[in-house]
Image (cartoon, helix red, strand yellow):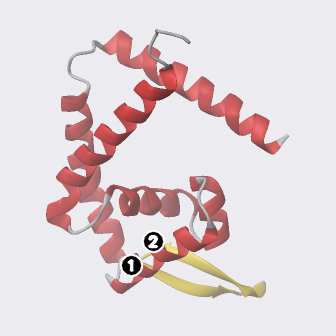
Amino acid sequence: MSVTARAFFYIQQVEQLVRRRVDECLQPDGITAGQYMVMNLIIHHEPVSSAELARRANMTAQSMGEFIKHLEAKEFVTRTTDPNNRRVIQVSLTPAGRKLLVRCESKVDQAEREFFDILNGEEIAQMRFLLSRVRSAQLARRSA
């Protein structure tokens, strides 16, 4: 049995701490870290189908549907029929959703700066590079 701590465990623990911190900073705006992530995906790919969002977020279509349903109830997203394929429903941010996302971005920027304030700029750049490299390699393996 290995006595060294696994990188998986550190990553999982940091992910839980990140989610908690993002939830805390977004709570006054009435959205969760997960809803914020979905809104970020939407703005970068809109209009986009719920199925495509689920693939990009590595979650089930049912889970994504729940996120979309909650965001639609809060009037942050709209669903419309794709004019090229009436069976596909496309999701877009509403003006209120865009305004909320801008406000949340500044809050998350501040939370991220505080969260990683023990690292210098070079260490943060290296961490981003390494995490991006691991993510890209794993996504490439999944799609192969």
For image coordinates 21% across by 39% down, the residue present is 111
Residue at the limit of the structure toward the front, as seen here: 1
Q: Say which quarter of the image contains residue 109.
A: top left
For image coordinates 66% across by 69% down, the residue present is 51
Amino acid type of disc 1? His
Amino acid type of disc 2? Phe
Q: Which residue is mark 1?
A: 70
Mark 1 closeness class: few <14, some 14–19, many ≥20 residues within 10 Å: some
Q: Which residue is mark 2?
A: 67
Residue at the limit of the structure toward the left, as seen here: 28
Residue 49: where, in percent of width, then height? 64, 72
For the residues bearing labels 2 and 1, Cβ distance under 8 angstroms:
yes
Point out the image quarter for the N terminus: top right
- Helix or strand or loop: what does disc 2 sit on? helix
In this rendered view, identify the residue nearer to me: 130 or 78.
Answer: 130
Horizontal relation, residue 124 to residue 134: left or right: left
On screen, residue 128 above or below 34? above
